Image (cartoon, rainbow, N blue to C red):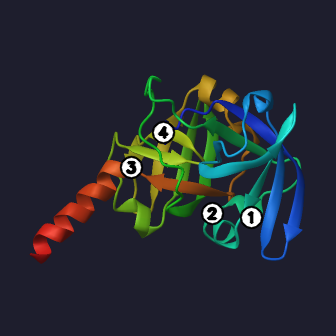
Amino acid sequence: MFTGLVEATGTITHIETLGEQSRFTIAIPFAQELALGDSVATNGCCLTVASFDDSSAKFDLLAQTLKVTSLGHLKVDSTVNLERALKANDRLGGHFVQGHVDDTGTIKDLSKHGQDHRFEVQLPDSILKYCIPKGSLAIDGISLTIAELTDDSAIFWITPHTFEHTHLHACTIGQPVNLEADLLAKYTERLLATQSAQ
């Protein structure tokens, strides 16, 4: 479980192709604090530490992970958002994020307006149905509040702190991003569907 509050950014230093799978080596500021088997949300996708040293960690990505997330589009020198799993006694400053990517979207706008940035992401119907104004949506592991919804996208306003301390400063229009809908919305849908079927 994560909060969607990005702890740090890292840089992909090596990508090894292993058939349909891949192994990513990522330079991580907190690499010395990791342990084998730790969970690290990488652009919102929960990955498991396979090995590590003082400056980096390696993660094995299954074919399914590469298929259903945006991680397969990353290259060496790509910047990624990183967050370690939530401790039971930590503050919950964002919202409940599982690190299970539901679908991918596409960046439509990332433009500066004064000190802030307008960030618009095109959403598939599979995600849009869970979104409400002022609701939460995890974009590449960042817990963001939806400012406005259109017929096919969500608009967010990004503060200078979020822009500078996540990978957003390196993002481009048309780039795919990982999406995780609000957990409570998904459970509510499931419960209502179960009740209506009875």
The location of residue 181, given as percent across then percent down, is 42, 54
What residue type is disc 3 on? Asp
Residue at the spot of label 3: 182
Q: Residue at 60% x, 29% y: name it.
A: 162
Badge 2 crowding class, 10 Å Cα cut-off, few under 14, some 14 to 19, many 20 or more, is many
Q: Earlier in the sequence, mark 2 or mark 4?
A: 2
Query: What is the C-alpha distance between the residues marked 3 and 4?
Result: 11 Å
Mark 3 burial class by Cα count in 10 Å: few <14, some 14-19, many 20+: many
Disc 2 is placed on an element classified as loop
User: In whole angstroms, how far apart are the C-alphas of marks 4 and 1?
Assistant: 23 Å
Q: Position of residue 41 (x, y in %)?
A: 62, 45
Kindly report the distance in space between the C-alpha atoms of the residues bearing marks 1 and 2: 7 Å
User: Disc 4 on helix, strand or loop?
Assistant: strand
3 vs 4, front mark:
3
Q: Is residue 89 left or right of residue 19?
A: left
> In the rendered structure, which disc, 3 or 1, sits on the residue that comes first in sequence?
1
Q: Name the residue tied to disc 1.
A: 72
- x then y, percent, for residue 153: 46, 57
The residue pinned by badge 4 equals: 144
Could you tell me how far apart the alpha carbons at marks 3 and 1 are, in whole angstroms? 24 Å
N-terminal-most mark, 3 or 4:
4
Contact, CB < 8 Å: mark 1 with mark 2?
Answer: yes
Q: CA distance from mark 2 to mark 4?
A: 18 Å
Task: Tell me the amino acid under the disc marked 4.
Answer: Leu
Q: Which residue is mark 2?
A: 69
Asked which quadrant contains residue 24, the reply is bottom right
| Res 115 seen here | no
Figure check: 45 above or below 144: below
* Front-most of residues 128 and 155: 128
